[in-house]
Amino acid sequence: MKNYKNILAVCLLILGTSSCKKQLDIDPKQNIDANVALNTTADVQNALIGAYTFLATGDLYGNNLVFIPDLYASDNYLTWRGSFTTYRNISSKAIVSDNADVRRTWITAYSAINTANIVLSALNVVNDANTRNVIEGKALFIRGIMHFELVRLYALPYDASGANANLGVPIITKAVKTIDNVTNSVARNTVAEVYAAVENDLKSAITKLSAVDDQYAAKAFLARVYLQEGKYALARDMANDIITNSPYHLITNSLEAPFRTKNSNEGIFEIKQNEQSNAGTSNDGLATFYASYQNATGGDVGRADALVNTTFYNSFEAGDKRQTEMIYDGTGARTGFFTKKWYSFYDNIPVCRVTEQYLIRAESNFRLGTAIGATPADDINTLRTRAGLGNVIPTLAIILNEREKELDYEGFRLHDYKRTKRSIGTFAYDDPKLVFPIPDREINVNKALRQNPGY
């Protein structure tokens, strides 16, 4: 998505190398100065860049929002061999309420939300109506997706058949002066209320955004939200719109291309990575943890902390290119199987790919007994053909398996298992152990917050 991608490139130049360092003994708070007046359009646009900067950090889409949902659902899927206790505890479901990765993800997500709210509070200084709408739409997009990511990690899952009255996360729609005060004195909203707010922000963003790329980024997330809620007709129609009308399409000649090609035709929303955002093995990033090979000079690339579990590797059908081309034998810091999706430190991170939309449309059509845009068989077999496999007559189990194979190690596993009510190892989908604690620092300063059970 060109406009978002260009903004993120600027953001990462501003970000510098220091904010991405993996130093778990340091409070991950990042400072913003909400006391600085936004008096011009340029001021507001710079503040918007600041909001996007947060998204690119290792706290959010630069690592944790992609890595942690798979690490948390690692049973027979991902093997953690790293030394960081915070990640080991997440993998083993032995999280404590002062877990630094739980804390930094919460803080930085709310920092992004607060910066978006600062932008929204200053729209009156933007005189040009079109520019104002675009800025507003992008700020709403950020606020919407951050509330979505937070409620999926820090609350029990949305239940399409329930009232969803369980505690979600605080909905923050007003700017505050400092990050420390973002959620002060604010109670947790219900899961239903948070999802409603997410929908409203994304739908409003779509109406405000003028560029096609921007609109479809918001639509891709909204389709993901609808699927998580079990709103299959809405998810199907949104996915069909993206497949049919957007400029994005499947790259049929290479499974690896969407992860090696910046701004690829398959990537709807990508996060840029470069020497400032992820400078190598000592840093915080997907390739840092997933990669294990030697470069041209014989040096090890990656820490090789996250391995493809052999049980998952063996679950692929014979000849599946998603196994033979996208999983490789490690030759670096560790041997074993590793995903090739997160292979280079400086490749873009495709957060939303059009591939996902084929899977959303297929699953939604199947569940509804419809064939809007294509039959479930057409969509699933399109992906299987690309993977070098023959056609199948899909069942729900086949569709979910194809989803898992297509989107492996892209941050979907935890959320997919929860929404489909599948157990993760010995843990039921709604086990409190599969929900992050509200960070201790938040509970200590905000007496209105209630902690999740078990913490």
Image: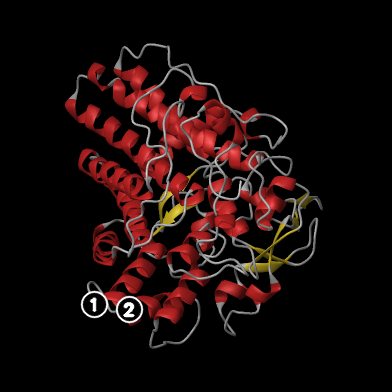
- Identify the amino acid type marked 2: Pro
Q: Is disc 2 placed on a helix, strand or loop? A: helix
Q: Disc 2 vs disc 1: Cβ atoms closer than 8 Å? A: yes
User: Could you tell me which secondary element the residue under label 1 belongs to?
Assistant: loop
Q: Position of residue 291 (x, y in %)?
A: 69, 55
**Residue 325 visible within the image:** yes
Q: Is residue 369 left or right of residue 110?
A: left
Q: Residues within 10 Å of mark 2 (few under 14, many from 20)?
A: many
Residue at (51% x, 67% y) in the render: 255
Q: Horizontal and vertical percent for residue 125?
A: 25, 16
Number of the label disc, if any, that sits on residue 376: 2
Q: Quadrant of residue 311?
A: bottom right
Front-lying residue, 448 or 278: 448
The residue at the point 41 percent across, 64 percent down is: 355
Tell me if 293 is positioned left or right of 342 in this view.
Answer: right
Distance from Cα at disc 2 to Cα at disc 1: 7 Å
Lower position in the chain sequence, tag 2 or tag 1: 1
Which one is nearer the viewer's eye here, 69 or 14? Answer: 69
Q: Residues within 10 Å of mark 1 (few under 14, many from 20)?
A: some
Q: Which residue is mark 1?
A: 371
Residue 279, image x and y in percent?
Answer: 67, 38
Classify 414 as above or below 426: above
Q: Is residue 78 left or right of residue 33?
A: right
- Quadrant hosting residue 382: bottom left
Residue 88 x/y as whole percent = 72, 52
- Looking at this view, is 278 or 230 the one in front? 230
